[in-house]
Image: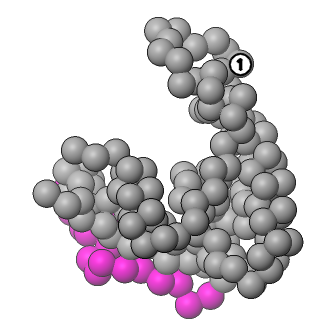
Amino acid sequence: MLDPYDLVWETALRNNIPVIGLENPEIFLDFSKTKDILTDAEVDLWATLEGGRIRNEYWIQILKKYREQHPDALFIIYTGAWHCYYNQFFSLPHAFEQETSWVVELLPDSKGMRLLESLTNEAVFSKPALKWDSRELGNITGFDISLKVRPEN
């Protein structure tokens, strides 16, 4: 099975969509080595809110540079919730005018999701898409729209 990122990269390349890497190479290259044990500092950068904030500050510098060069371009940032949800104080949309940001959550239709639905006796959401009518609701949940995604077999 393909890593979800592989599908994104392959689709972008196949459709001649430019891809910009945002991760700090010093952090990424350090983690690309096979390790049995991570130090506390390494865990902090990947698994804590403060680590997410530090990484986002680096990403924002890159995005602002490209925004200056391409002011009318559409930027699609494929990342985890902590990096982009409106309800995270350090998230990427806060660094730009909110009118230019739109957060789409991709919710995998998985065994875990079906188990959650069976335990709660209700669908997490019964339609394939959930869209808020106001930014206020997006600010509370973190996203503007949530799409249920079925993995390809």
Could you tell me which quadrant the C terminus lies in? bottom left
Membership of 122 in magenta stretch: yes
Could you tell me which quadrant the N terminus lies in? top left
Q: Nearer the viewer, residue 58 or 106?
A: 58
Furthest residue in direction top, as rendered? 36
Eyeballing the image, is 128 above or below 65?
below
In magenta, the rendered stretch is 118-134
Membership of 144 in magenta stretch: no
Q: Quadrant of residue 88?
A: bottom right
Q: Look at 56% across and 77% down and name the residue there.
A: 144
Q: Quadrant of residue 134?
A: bottom right
Residue 84 appears in the figure: yes
Q: What is the magenta segment's predominant secondary structure?
A: loop
Q: Which residue is mark 1?
A: 41
Residue 17: x and y in percent read 52, 70
Residue 95 appears in the figure: no
Eyeballing the image, is 17 above or below 151?
below
Q: Look at 74% across and 84% down and name the residue there.
A: 72
Furthest residue in direction bottom, as rendered? 133
62 left or right of 23 in image: right
User: How many numbered discs sit on the rendered protein?
Assistant: 1
Residue 145: x and y in percent read 49, 77
Q: Nearer the viewer, residue 99 or 134?
A: 99
Give the secondary structure at mark 1.
helix
Q: Nearer the viewer, residue 119 or 20?
A: 20
Eyeballing the image, is 138 above or below 49?
below
Q: Look at 71% across and 38% down and name the residue there.
A: 24
58 left or right of 47 in image: right
Question: Badge 1: few (under 14), some or many (20 or more) residues near its Cα, within 10 Å?
Answer: few
